[in-house]
Image (cartoon, rainbow, N blue to C red):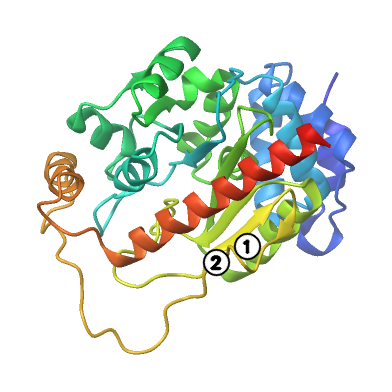
Amino acid sequence: MSIAPYIKEIGRGKEGARSLSSEQAEDLMGQVLDGRVSDLEVGAFAMAMRIKGESTDELLGFLRAVHKRCLPLSPQAPALILPSYNGARKLPNLTALLALLVAQDGTPVLVHGPTHDPGRVTTASVFHDLGLPMARNAEDVLHGWARREPVFIATDTLCPPLARLLDVRWVVGLRNPGHTVAKLLDPTLGARALRVVNHTHPEYGTALSAFLHRSGASAMLLRGTEGEPVADPRRSPRLDVFLRGELRADLSVPAQEGVLTELPVLPRSIDAATTAVYIQSVVSGEKPAPGPLTRQADSLHRALKALTEGSMHELSA
């Protein structure tokens, strides 16, 4: 079946385009992921959605289609999911540090993303230099969690068809809905996980907030550092925590205001090896962790605890 009827709806330009229902979006994305459409159609889909933008219903459908084609994971305790798809350009990539700070108490932490990105320092490369687990399958993930270590899994292992859609960017030069969906993935299928969802523009944060509420997600929403799910080490951003779709003011953290009086000591170079050495020095206690990351990790621990208590209450009810 062709996706031409869908492209006709979403491809009428920013003002004339119409959004798809969640069912239509799921069908469209399923056909794209399964390779049942031509390269020309995939390119048209990517361009049309880039111009129009995704609606909440479309994101719901896209995400359902991707989840059906993901490697399923079943953590024994509420897990933290960190999507890492941008890497570092100017600041050190500290996603691995956040993962380690949260995993210290035994929380299962899964980081997923690409292994390579031209011109950027990926979290995968930092994980490699730290000697942290790089999973090849679900069993590797569970083994890493059993050792109380955060685990990295490549997108082409977690969801191969999604990885192929993400690679379309290198052909057409633009991001597509696959990049948005990747940052919303929950391979536990909502069983027991908290996602960190980040955005780079305020209006996109508003759209993601609406999605998290509508989908009943448990997540932390923040303006990420260069598109990574980690707080800027120089100034704490606003951290909005959602549990089962409800914004929890008691668990959320306001943005740091006022003039900065002190900046953290960060590595001068952002390459993976230097970043790994710095992260190891923080984890060992030789250097202090940047305050914004400590606050983010503390907020995540409180949210995970609340998620655990809520799950236990539901089971006893």
Query: x and y percent of residue 69 in the render?
Result: 66, 19
Query: x and y percent of residue 32 in the render?
Result: 70, 25
Is residue 11 something one can see in this rendering?
A: no
SS label for mark 1: helix
Q: Quadrant of residue 125?
A: top left
SS label for mark 2: loop
Q: Does residue 309 appear left or right of residue 266 in this picture?
A: right
Amino acid, disc 2: His
Amino acid, disc 1: Tyr
Q: Work out how far the residue at label 1 is from the one at label 2, CA to CA, in angstroms.
A: 5 Å
In the image, 2 versus 208, the foreground residue is 208
Disc 1 crowd, CA 10 A, few/some/many (<14, 14-19, 20+) = some
Is residue 76 something one can see in this rendering?
A: yes
Q: Are marks 1 and 2 in contact (CB under 8 Å)?
A: yes
Q: Quadrant of residue 307?
A: top right
Q: Does residue 161 appear left or right of residue 226 in this picture?
A: right
- Seen at 74% across and 57% down, the residue is 246
Q: Quadrant of residue 31?
A: top right
Q: Does residue 227 appear left or right of residue 207 in this picture?
A: left
